[in-house]
Amino acid sequence: MIGRLRGPILEKAPPTLIVEAGGVGYTVDAPLSTIYHLPALGEEVSLRVHTVVREDAIQLYGFLTADEQRLFAALLRVTGVGAKLALQVLSGLPPAELWRCIQEEDLKRMSSVPGIGRKTAQRLVMELRDTLEAPGGAEALDTGAGAAPAGGGARREAVAALQELGYSSDQAEQVVAGIAEEGLAVEELLKRSLQNMAR
């Protein structure tokens, strides 16, 4: 099993990355909470990896912190939650906020994440409330590395990433278009878009 990958980022198309390690490019899916804080293309990153082995595929999921990886593994143990939905939850709710939502039974906020209806939110609370530890915060996500500057396709990439997370084409295009500031990196566009959708 692959537990960690370290190497330069070859491609970024949220939520998917390609990271080179030992001359091999590994495809890794990551939540937006990780993607927001990645260095620019070509720079080195060290990711914690959760490996999912199925009959037809081996899928790698990458995280910058132990909290993200731990929460991802906990979400996978919840009835009816698969890897894609777990990524969507972590993309829409950073670790500290997800923990707060579960402890306070904030079903409304949890249900704002695509794919999470009220029943699934209730199941998350019921199955995780007594077993989930609070995020430690020991590993800072601010690595000092800035996001890659946005190119002309940054808005298209942001819309595509939001659609991958389960938002409709209209929702994604509307929220990205509502962010007036030009020259933002894809990561920042995604972050602001999700903040706007959570309001």
Image (cartoon, helix red, strand yellow):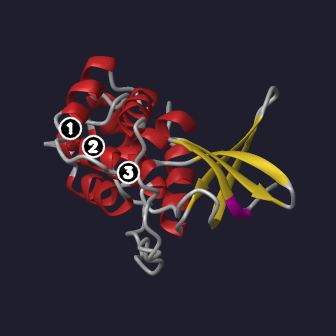
Residue interval drawn in magenta: 4-8
Mark 1 and mark 2 in contact (Cβ < 8 Å)?
A: yes
Q: Which residue is mark 1?
A: 197
Judged by depth in the image, the label closer to the viewer, 3 or 1, is: 3
Query: The residue tagged with tag 2: helix, strand or loop?
Result: helix
Q: Is residue 172 above or below residue 21?
A: above
The residue drawn where x is 32% and y is 63% is 96
Query: The residue tagged with tag 3: helix, strand or loop?
Result: loop
Q: CA distance from mark 2 to mark 3?
A: 14 Å
Q: Which residue is mark 3?
A: 185
Q: Which mark is residue 194?
A: 2
Residue type, mark 2 in image: Leu
Locate residue 133, reporting x and y percent. Answer: 42, 68
Q: Is residue 191 above or below residue 88?
A: below
Q: Nearer the viewer, residue 137 or 101?
A: 137
Q: Quadrant of residue 8?
A: bottom right
Residue type, mark 1 in image: Met
Q: Is residue 6 magenta?
A: yes
Q: For this view, does 140 lie left or right of residue 121?
A: right
Q: CA distance from mark 2 to mark 1?
A: 5 Å
Judged by depth in the image, the label closer to the viewer, 2 or 3, is: 3
Query: The residue tagged with tag 1: helix, strand or loop?
Result: helix
Q: Nearer the viewer, residue 23 or 133?
A: 23
The residue at the far left in this view is 199
